[in-house]
Image (cartoon, rainbow, N blue to C red):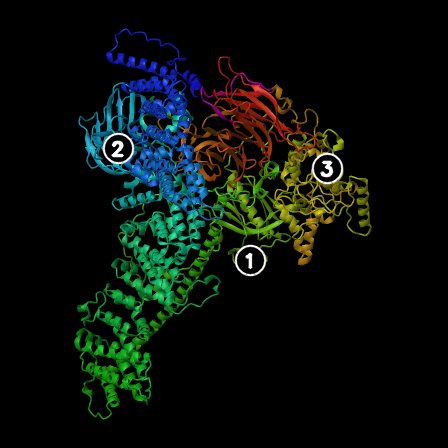
């Protein structure tokens, strides 16, 4: 069957005979006699030729078998015969034999069936054996078979054998043997048919040792494809193949890579789903399929396969498929990079010509390798460099894992004995050779970035003359299984720390180190590791300069010039080299920047990397990488969101985490989305589902190590802040999760060996102490969990015990909560605050603080931060044990005096113990020796003890005796406590006095003794005066009297005080012993003289009085301070609650991330979902609004302004390492008053109330609010209250927020109406609340406007074609904003350069006048526009737009909408005749006077009103009002709702709605009872307003019973709204209208605006100045007046006082005056100029043509280069730079031929500028990126940008494509970008918002790849082109014309159309699209509907105007036209020859 294929394929080989009977021509004998070996080889070659020819002619199985055996024997003798076998079509012959092996034999002899079967099997075996041998270790043959014969041929050839049950088993075995090149396993399937799975398992386990590496992957795919063809679908055979595949894929890494390349995932997934849904399916088979699927996914999958898997994981009911979830969970763990799988012998070879040796400056060699099997013995070469057959340098791997180095500089090889490369993991090896390091050359080996070993090693010597050098990675001999991710050779030795940075970039990085911001490629773990390394280094160096190399590399990039990169070998670099082209391998300069590179170096020429041996390129894309292309982190977030069980939640969290952990792109995406906050918000709703597995998964990602807690750290500070510190989330979880969450703080800050790093680098700025203190004030945690919270607080506070972070917050909290509960405020804000247990929690915090202060360092910091005048007793006791000077300091601040007041009130046994601990110094260590101590340490506490004694005794004395009261009577517990504590106190005083001399010395102080005497006397007096003495009081009196008597004998007590004691003793004795007559024990005469005693007592009393005054003053201050602290803490608490609420509100509104997943083309898009559309406010040229945008769909794609959290920073100086104690405030000059004031400032700091907290998150990073004002944003008739914020760098408009009277930002819904109500506006509070922002540079201009005749409005115009109309509350506020905007524009105007207009235009092509142009008219603007209109430089439509703008009409205000005239009156004809005046309306008359009857009615109305004294008018309605606008636009949102609003919330009667254009004209022009309305701009621009796209039910008309749907069109519109719009616009631009338009302008804006004679007077209230809403105070009257304005309309401002001049109509009226020819009119006159405009050089294709307005020249751009418009010296480049390095994914900025910025991983494939400041790029990762172009001071992104130097900053990443983006274009005029992709679609994007709008589809498949796209700047039409189709659409993707190209598509690899360009005019009557072809032709096409059959809907089609043939010489082929551009009325084209030509018209 395949014999017919032989001839055409054979013809490819010259040595192959063309016919079977061709005789072999012997080769002429050489001059020298052949060697025996050569002779034998020649003989074998000849035998091979003959045998193959014999095989072709063999006609039966046996003869074929014999020949096959002979061929095999020959091939085994000499491998060179394999080439001959291929050249003789041997593989095709084999396929032919195999396909016919079962052909029935003819002849008289019928052989036995068994014999026939045996012959067939033997012949089949030989075919497979021969094929296997021919391809084994012969890359050319295996590639030839794969590419030219194809495994499909093999599949077809074995069909007969497979379908036969007798041969199927052997054939399957042969296929397996072919794949493995091992025919010992050919019988593996024998006898398995019909057996069970146990038998299969046993058989496969037996052959498992025989299985090996897959040699021919295609055979495995054939084996898989055969499965459905198995006879009877035998389950045993099917299971055997599945199981065999499982064994193979798990056998080794190469097999795994091979399976991943076979495209099995989709069919495997389909089979897996079938088994899951089939109840009868075998579980073992399902399990094997699942394992196979997981193993293949471990390497990766294509993006399409990954997309399919993710699509299936979410079911239609928004639940998860757990089986698929498990597959994703396993696949997401894969971390494989793209790599080469190397099975030695395998080498990558790069040759470089013209070099003398290794670089003289030294070198750095780096390689990422993964070792599966090391060499069994000897050493395997990893890298070598050789010249002229001599190896100069070799790095090898020994069998024991050590590295070996050999070079010409040393005779013996050296072994790095410390090196020991691990197996089965990626390892980074760096070899750095310093040739001149301190005159001692050295080699340094780094493994995984760490210096491993150093050798003194001579540098390899250079050769004398330049030669060809060979760089080789791999070994040609040694057997080793390994993989390479990338391999680099640099011509500079790197600094020691730089390999660490490169290692942390990971094996997936294969860039060129040119990006200045390399840290973006770091994962979270890598950046943390580098930060920890820098922090560790910082502690060991004396100055920051010593660690600057690594810090500089982190900050500014590696600093390695690209010229130093000798080669980069990686799978991606090899792919990029293929793009350079094999024909240009020696042609280095492919871009200007690479040409610059050449000028900087010598002339070595690098050839492409050559693969030799067994190398398999694993172009893998693991699931986390595919996730980025499909949708990024939003997909994983969505999975978490839909999880419904703890198991699902833990699995989805694992998927999310694994998708982020090793993928910097997903990490950036997560940061951009604010994904961590979103995740916390999602988890808050699923808190009870979080189990320990989910918790550990999440916190392992944050940095905790649950296996080795001592290795825990925080690797992602932003995620940690958002998730781990969301205590509200974790407080809702299960108890065990709560506790382990709180314990993790202790792990990080106490257990971890990195606790210092965690504390200083991660926790220092989190404010965690305050967060925990806030948590303690809430009810989030249950009472039994509070101790864990306090433990965490203690760990956090102790780790960073600084003043602001810990000390002040804790002291403030204690001061506010250790006392009475604060008075509660309304519970609206503080509803979750816990007031019931505040004191109990505060006491626990107090205990924690004391334990912290037990650490000396903490105590030192504490005392240096705060004076101790506010510290409580337990705190004081702790202090005394440490500081000996404390007593004196405390006395200076009246501390002891205050204590005398405070202590007695709190006396209890615990206080008693603490007090005596202070007294005796028993605090620090309460062991037995300390407890036995009786030495007084702090005598200052004794007065407080005696005051406490006084208070206690007084309480005991005044407690009356109760009947029956005994010692254990019925006293209250409190009373008993007091009596007991006093007894204990007195007893301890007695014991101390007896045992402690130091205690007795205390009584030398008369003041102290007097305190005791007073207490004693008072107690005796109180008891003696009591009538009912308490027995316990008597007992206590006896004890204290005993102490007093002892004291009276003490020599330390003064005599007078002894006398007082004795006197009191006598009185006391009479109480407890009434019968006693004994004299006192001390003689009274011993007392000193009375005078001296009186003086001492008087002095003592004075001292006490002074001390009391100071104490009272201090107590008052303390009370005030505490109240102040409580107020401050209350404010702080309220602020925290409000901030938390605002944060939750913000995050809950972050839902745009999910929209793109479920919207059109989203991963989980709902099929059949109707998309709602609304008119986009973005304006096109001439303020046209015709672009539609999706309603309620605005997924954000911004990436700029996000916080970089994977940054590596230079550690701050450790200011706390050596703590310096400041001079304490209690120094010698210390004053109490100053201390108190200072304390208040320190602790009771003012909590600033941020009144703008609601809007802070909307600000751009670094922006500052300068002015805020409440405004109403006007949108049609709706008024949306909001804030207009003027920032330092940006302007913001935030809907739904207003300022309260005190300046706080609040919701408009919650605000009183007076704060935002604009008189006359219809307030919309429930609509979409938008947040818009513009940089100041985007503000083009502004205009003061009126709104409902009030001069308080402002319209701001922006350069992005948007505008903003706002109304202020008063004129003053508008004036303030005017001044700010003026200052901003003036400041920028001084520095901004002017962008010149076009210089080469023969027809002036005005810059499309959007709002920003039309708003900037000077005083003479109107006259300028008038002159341009007269000379036909602008169209009628444009002129009317300008007049509308100048007169104050704006599309933003429906009451002042732009006005356009009715043009036509013929709405009944089948064909519209625009040459007939009868088709047009009379423009000299108003609409109300077009008929005689209406003229009479208007005149009568005027006269009647005049006769009754009223202001007369002709018409009671108006030609323009908000009602008219909404009436016409009723089908188009947002005007649909506006109409209902004006109608009071419902539709009007169906018969009164706009349903028919003709009827609307009749009502406005002829009906006496009708209206007089004119038209709106949409009648000439926007066909969608005529269609009911939203399928709204407007009701049924009563007059005809028809349901209102689309507006009825006149017959000549052919049922096509677009055709109606085009013809209406064509009529507007007709000569007839041009002649009569001045008359209509006079009626609306001119001298006849209020002319009675012209019947043109309207209601007086419609004229400016007739109404003053501000003067109307009555609410009802004002509303009625507003209704009048909405209904009667507003007449525009008068502009002309004299009749309007006429237009010049001579000459060709479609062209401006002075232009004789135009392309549309005279395309047949176009002629190609003979000389090219520019020649880039041979084989340098011209891809883009840019107009240089400054130099007035055309700039052709080659492939991968694009010049910046208006900046010809600036350009961007992408694509491969040169052979040997990659650069294919880079985006390079080039200024003056010098690369100034490199952005790696941009994956750029195409680019387009929308304007000089905005760039759009398409990417191979399926995304479209938007970039901001900055220059000079604007630049904040490019680290290497200099003043005035251009750089680009990424602003948006947009996803919707499912394949590589091939082409992009952008239009600033329409604010759109269009991208074309391999997926068969062109996507339309909104440039301003960076969001997807809609798609244009060409189909599916390779032939539908859209490769060209263009946008018409004038009309917004979009042209797209694929190989077989050219399409034209409107800007809203409405299909117009389609051209079938299949007839012109040839077998050429180039498509028929290779370039596109629109002819641009301000208005074009026909439109021209030029297409360039690969055949050297340019076709000019237009489009139209003239071919539409009568009565049918309009059918658009392309019409060829002219075909141009490009000039070329006869001997050259026709050049391919690769670029086109119209320049005015000329055409420019570029070719693949590098030439650019101009086509011109005659002058």
Q: Spatial distance from mark 3 to mark 1, Cα to Cα?
A: 47 Å
From the image, state whether disc 3 or disc 1 is nearer to you.
1
Quadrant position of the N terminus in the picture = top left
Q: Is residue 77 above or below residue 958?
A: above
Residue at 65 percent across and 50 percent down: it is 1540
Q: Nearer the viewer, residue 1429 or 1379?
A: 1429
Question: Quick check: can you spot residue 1402?
Answer: no
Position of 1734 with respect to 2003 (left or right) is left
Would you say the residues marked 3 and 1 are in contact, meaning their CB atoms lie under 8 Å apart? no
Instruction: Find residue 1311 and name its label.
Output: 1
Q: What x and y, as percent, mark residue 1477? A: 75, 31
Does 1105 appear above or below 468? Answer: below
**Between discs 3 and 1, the one toward the N terminus:** 1
Q: Note whether residue 212 is visible.
A: yes
Report x, y in % for residue 795. 31, 57
Q: Quadrant of residue 549?
A: top left
Tags 3 and 2 in contact by the CB under 8 Å rule?
no
Q: CA distance from mark 3 to mark 2?
A: 84 Å
Question: Which mark is in front, 1 or 2?
Answer: 2
Q: Is tag 1's residue or tag 2's residue first in the polypeptide sequence? A: 2
Q: Which residue is mark 2?
A: 431
Q: Tags 1 and 2 in contact by the CB under 8 Å rule?
A: no
- As helix, strand or loop, the secondary structure at mark 2 comes to strand
Circle 1: element type? loop
Q: Residues within 10 Å of mark 1 (few under 14, many from 20)?
A: some
Please give the range of residues in magenta: 1726-1747
Which quadrant of the figure has residue 730?
A: bottom left
Residue that numbered label 3 is attached to:
1640
1730 drawn magenta: yes
Seen from the viewer's position, the closer of residues 447 and 1705 is 447
Q: Pick the quarter of the image with the C terminus.
A: top right
């Amino acid at each position: 069957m395949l014999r017919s294929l032989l001839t055409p394929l054979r013809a490819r080989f010259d040595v192959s005979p063309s016919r079977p009977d061709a005789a072999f021509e012997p080769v002429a004998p050489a001059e020298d006699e052949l060697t025996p070996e050569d002779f034998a080889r020649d003989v074998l070659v000849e035998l091979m030729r003959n045998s193959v020819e014999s095989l072709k002619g063999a006609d039966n199985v046996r003869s074929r078998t014999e020949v096959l055996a002979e061929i095999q024997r020959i091939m085994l003798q000499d491998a060179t015969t394999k080439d001959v076998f291929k050249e003789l079509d041997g593989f095709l012959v084999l396929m032919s034999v195999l396909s016919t092996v079962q052909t029935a034999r003819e002849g008289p002899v019928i052989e036995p069936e068994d014999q026939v079967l045996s012959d067939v099997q033997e012949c089949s075996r030989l075919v497979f054996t021969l094929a296997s041998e021919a391809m084994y270790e012969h890359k050319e043959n295996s590639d030839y078979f794969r590419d030219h014969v194809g495994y499909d041929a093999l599949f077809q050839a074995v069909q007969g054998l497979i379908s036969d049950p007798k041969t199927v088993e052997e054939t399957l075995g042969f296929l397996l043997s072919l794949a493995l090149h091992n025919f010992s396993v050919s019988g593996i399937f024998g006898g398995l048919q019909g057996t069970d799975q146990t038998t299969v398992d046993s058989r496969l386990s037996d052959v498992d040792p025989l299985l090996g590496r897959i040699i021919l992957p295609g055979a495995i795919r054939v084996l898989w494809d055969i499965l459905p063809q198995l006879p009877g679908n035998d389950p045993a055979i099917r299971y055997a193949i599945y199981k065999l595949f499982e064994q193979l894929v798990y056998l080794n890494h190469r097999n795994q890579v091979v399976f991943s390349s076979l495209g099995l995932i989709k069919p495997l997934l389909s089979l897996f789903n079938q088994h899951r849904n089939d109840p009868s399916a075998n579980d073992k088979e399902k399990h094997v399929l699942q394992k196979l699927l997981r193993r293949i996914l471990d390497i990766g999958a294509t993006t399409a396969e990954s997309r399919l898997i993710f699509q299936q994981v979410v079911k239609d009911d928004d639940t998860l498929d757990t089986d698929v979830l498990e597959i994703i969970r396993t696949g997401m763990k894969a971390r494989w990079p793209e790599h080469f799988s190397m099975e030695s012998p395998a080498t990558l070879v790069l040759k470089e010509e013209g070099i003398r040796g290794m670089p003289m400056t030294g070198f750095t060699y780096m390689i990422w390798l993964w070792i599966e099997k090391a060499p069994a013995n000897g050493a395997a070469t990893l890298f070598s460099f050789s010249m002229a057959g001599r190896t100069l340098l070799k790095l090898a791997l020994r069998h024991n894992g050590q590295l070996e180095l050999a070079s010409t500089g040393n005779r013996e090889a050296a072994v790095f004995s410390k090196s020991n490369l691990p197996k089965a993991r990626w390892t980074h090896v760096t070899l750095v050779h310093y040739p001149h390091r301190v005159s001692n050359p050295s080699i340094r080996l780094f493994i995984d970035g760490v210096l491993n070993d150093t050798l003194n090693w001579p540098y390899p010597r250079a050769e004398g003359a330049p030669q060809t050098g060979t760089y080789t990675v791999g070994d040609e001999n040694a057997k080793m299984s390994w993989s390479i991710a990338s391999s680099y050779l640099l011509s500079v030795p790197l600094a020691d720390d730089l390999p660490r940075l490169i290692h942390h970039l990971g094996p997936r990085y294969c860039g060129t180190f040119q990006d200045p911001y390399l840290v973006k490629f770091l994962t979270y773990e890598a950046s943390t590791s580098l930060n920890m390394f820098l922090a560790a280094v910082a502690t060991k160096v004396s100055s920051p300069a010593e660690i600057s190399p690594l810090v500089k590399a982190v900050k500014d990039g590696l600093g390695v010039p690209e010229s130093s990169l000798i080669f980069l070998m990686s799978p991606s670099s090899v792919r990029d080299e293929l793009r350079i082209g094999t024909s240009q391998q020696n042609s280095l300069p492919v871009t200007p920047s690479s040409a610059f590179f050449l000028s900087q170096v010598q002339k070595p020429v690098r050839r492409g990397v050559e693969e030799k041996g067994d190398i398999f390129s694993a172009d893998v894309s693991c699931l986390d990488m595919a996730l980025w292309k499909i949708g990024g982190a939003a997909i994983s977030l969505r999975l978490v969101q839909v999880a419904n069980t703890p198991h699902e939640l833990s699995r989805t969290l694992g998927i999310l985490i694994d998708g982020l952990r090793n993928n910097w792109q997903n990490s950036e995406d997560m940061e951009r989305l604010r994904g961590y906050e979103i995740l916390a918000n999602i988890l808050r709703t699923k808190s009870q589902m979080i189990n320990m597995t989910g918790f550990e998964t999440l916190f392992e990602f944050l940095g905790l190590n649950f296996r080795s807690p001592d290795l825990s750290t925080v690797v992602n500070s932003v995620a940690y802040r958002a998730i781990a510190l969301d205590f509200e989330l974790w407080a809702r979880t299960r108890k065990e999760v709560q506790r382990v969450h709180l314990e993790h703080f202790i792990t990080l800050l106490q257990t971890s060996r990195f606790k210092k790093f965690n504390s200083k680098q991660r926790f220092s700025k989190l404010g965690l102490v305050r967060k925990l203190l806030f948590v303690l004030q809430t009810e989030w945690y249950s009472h039994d969990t509070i101790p864990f919270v306090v433990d965490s607080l203690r760990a956090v506070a102790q780790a960073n015990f600084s003043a602001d972070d810990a000390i002040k917050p804790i002291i403030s909290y204690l001061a506010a909560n250790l006392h009475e509960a604060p008075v509660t405020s309304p519970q609206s804000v503080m509803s979750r605050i816990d007031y019931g247990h505040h004191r109990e929690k505060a006491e626990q915090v107090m205990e924690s603080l004391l334990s912290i202060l037990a650490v000396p360092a903490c105590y030192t910091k504490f005392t240096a931060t705060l004076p101790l005048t506010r510290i409580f007793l337990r705190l004081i006791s702790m202090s005394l044990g440490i500081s000996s000077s404390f007593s004196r300091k405390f006395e200076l601040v009246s501390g002891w005096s205050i204590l005398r007041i405070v202590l007695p009130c709190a006396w209890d046994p615990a206080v008693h113990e603490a007090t005596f601990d202070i007294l005796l110094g028993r605090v620090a260590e309460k062991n037995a020796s300390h407890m036995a101590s009786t030495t007084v340490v702090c005598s200052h506490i004794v007065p407080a003890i005696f005051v406490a004694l006084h208070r206690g005794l007084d309480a005991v004395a005044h407690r009356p005796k109760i009947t029956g009261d005994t010692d254990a009577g019925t006293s209250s517990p409190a009373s008993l406590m007091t009596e007991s504590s006093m007894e204990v106190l007195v007893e301890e005083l007695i014991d101390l006095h007896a045992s402690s001399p130091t205690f007795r010395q205390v009584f030398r102080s008369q003041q102290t003794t007097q305190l005791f005497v007073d207490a004693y006397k008072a107690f005796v007096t109180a008891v003696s005066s009591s009538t009912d003495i308490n027995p316990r009081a008597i007992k206590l009196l006896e004890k204290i009297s005993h102490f007093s008597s002892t004291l009276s004998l003490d020599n330390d007590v003064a005599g007078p005080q002894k006398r007082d004691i004795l006197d009191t003793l006598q009185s006391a004795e009479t109480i407890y012993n009434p019968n006693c007559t004994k004299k006192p024990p001390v003689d009274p005469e011993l007392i000193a003289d009375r005078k001296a005693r009186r003086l001492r007592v008087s002095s003592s009393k004075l001292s006490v009085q002074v001390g009391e005054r100071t104490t009272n003053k201090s107590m008052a201050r303390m009370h005030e301070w505490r109240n102040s602290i409580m107020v401050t803490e209350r404010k702080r608490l309220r602020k925290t609650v409000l901030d938390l609420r605002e944060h939750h509100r913000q995050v809950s509104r972050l839902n745009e991330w999910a929209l793109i997943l479920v919207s059109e083309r989203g991963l989980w898009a709902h099929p059949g979902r109707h998309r709602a559309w609304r008119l986009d406010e973005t304006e096109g040229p001439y303020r046209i609004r015709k672009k539609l945008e999706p309603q309620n769909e605005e997924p954000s794609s911004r990436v700029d302004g996000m916080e970089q959290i994977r940054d590596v920073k230079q550690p701050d100086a450790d200011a706390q390492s050596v703590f310096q104690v400041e001079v304490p405030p209690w120094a010698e000059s210390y004053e109490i008053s100053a201390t108190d004031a200072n304390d208040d400032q320190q602790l009771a700091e003012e909590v600033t109330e941020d009144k703008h907290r609601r809007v802070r998150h909307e600000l751009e990073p670094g922006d500052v609010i300068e002015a805020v004002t409440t405004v109403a944003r006007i949108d049609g008739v709706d008024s949306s209250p909001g804030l207009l914020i003027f920032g330092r760098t940006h302007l913001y408009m935030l809907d739904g927020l207003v300022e309260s009277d005190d300046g706080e930002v609040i919701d408009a819904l919650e605000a009183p109406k007076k704060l935002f109500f604009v008189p006359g506006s219809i307030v919309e509070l429930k609509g979409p609340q938008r947040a818009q922002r513009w940089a100041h540079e985007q503000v083009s201009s502004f205009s003061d406007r009126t709104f409902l005749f009030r001069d308080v409005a402002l319209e701001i115009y922006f350069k992005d074609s948007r505008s903003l109309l706002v109304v202020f509350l008063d004129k003053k506020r508008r004036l303030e904003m005017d001044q700010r905007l003026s200052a901003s524009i003036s400041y920028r105007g001084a520095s901004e350069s002017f962008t010149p207009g076009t210089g080469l235009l023969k027809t002036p092509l005005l810059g499309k006048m959007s709002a920003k142009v039309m708003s900037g008219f000077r005083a003479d603007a109107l006259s300028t526009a008038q002159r341009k209109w007269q000379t036909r430089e602008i169209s009628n439509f444009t002129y009317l737009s300008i007049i509308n703008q100048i007169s104050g009409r704006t599309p933003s205000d429906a009451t002042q909408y732009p006005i356009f005239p009715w043009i036509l009156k013929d709405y009944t004809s089948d064909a519209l005749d625009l040459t007939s005046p009868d088709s047009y309306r009379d423009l000299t008359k108003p609409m109300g006077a077009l008929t005689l009857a209406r003229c009479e009615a208007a005149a009568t109305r005027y006269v009647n009103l005049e006769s009754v004294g009223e202001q007369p008018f002709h018409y009671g309605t108006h030609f323009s009002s908000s009602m008219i606008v909404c009436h016409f636009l009723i089908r188009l949102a947002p005007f649909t709702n506006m109409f209902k609003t004006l109608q009071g919330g419902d539709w009007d009667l169906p018969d009164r709605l706009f349903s028919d254009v003709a009827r609307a004209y009749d009502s406005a022009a002829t009906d006496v009872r009708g209206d007089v309305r004119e038209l709106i701009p949409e009648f000439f621009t926007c066909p969608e307003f005529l269609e009911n796209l939203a399928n709204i039910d407007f009701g049924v008309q009563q007059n005809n019973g028809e349901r209102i749907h689309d507006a009825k069109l006149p017959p000549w519109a052919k049922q096509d709204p677009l055709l109606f719009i085009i013809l209406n616009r064509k009529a507007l631009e007709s000569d007839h209208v041009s002649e009569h338009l001045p008359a209509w302008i006079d009626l609306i804006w001119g001298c006849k605006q209020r002319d009675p004679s012209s019947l043109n007077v309207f209601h007086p209230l419609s004229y400016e100045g007739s109404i003053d809403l501000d003067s109307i105070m009555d609410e009802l009257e004002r509303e009625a007046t507003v209704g009048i304005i909405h209904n009667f309309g507003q007449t525009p401002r008068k502009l002309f006082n004299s009749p309007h001049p006429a237009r010049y109509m001579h000459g060709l009226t479609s062209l401006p005056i002075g232009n004789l020819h135009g392309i549309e009119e005279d395309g047949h006159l176009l002629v190609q100029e003979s000389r090219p405009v520019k020649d880039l050089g041979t084989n340098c294709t011209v891809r883009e043509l840019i107009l240089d307005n400054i130099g007035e020249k055309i700039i052709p751009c080659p492939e991968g280069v694009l010049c910046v418009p208006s900046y010809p010296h600036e350009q961007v480049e992408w694509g491969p730079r040169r052979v040997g390095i990659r650069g294919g994914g880079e985006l390079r900025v080039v200024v003056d031929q010098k690369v100034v910025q490199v952005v790696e991983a941009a994956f750029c494939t195409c680019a387009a500028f929308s304007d000089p400041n905005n760039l759009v790029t398409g990417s191979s990762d399926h995304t479209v990126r938007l970039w901001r172009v900055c220059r000079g001071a604007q630049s904040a992104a490019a680290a290497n940008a200099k003043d005035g130097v251009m750089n680009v900053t990424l602003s948006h990443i947009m996803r919707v494509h499912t394949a590589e983006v091939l082409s992009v274009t952008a239009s600033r005029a329409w604010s759109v970008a269009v991208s074309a992709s391999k997926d068969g679609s062109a996507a339309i994007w909104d440039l301003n918002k960076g969001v997807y709008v809609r798609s244009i589809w060409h189909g599916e498949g390779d032939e539908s790849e859209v490769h060209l796209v263009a946008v018409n700047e004038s009309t917004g039409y979009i042209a797209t082109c694929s190989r077989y189709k050219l399409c034209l659409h409107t800007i809203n993707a409405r299909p117009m014309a389609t051209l079938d190209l299949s007839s012109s598509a040839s077998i050429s690899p180039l498509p028929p159309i290779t370039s596109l360009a629109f002819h641009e005019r301000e208005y074009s009557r026909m439109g021209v699209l030029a297409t360039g072809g690969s055949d050297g032709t340019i076709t000019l096409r237009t489009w139209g509907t003239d071919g539409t059959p009568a009565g049918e809907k309009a059918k658009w089609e392309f019409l060829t105007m002219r075909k141009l043939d490009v000039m070329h010489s006869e001997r050259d082929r026709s050049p391919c036209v690769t670029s086109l551009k119209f320049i005015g009325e000329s055409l420019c084209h570029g070719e693949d020859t590098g030439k650019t030509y101009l086509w011109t018209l005659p002058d």
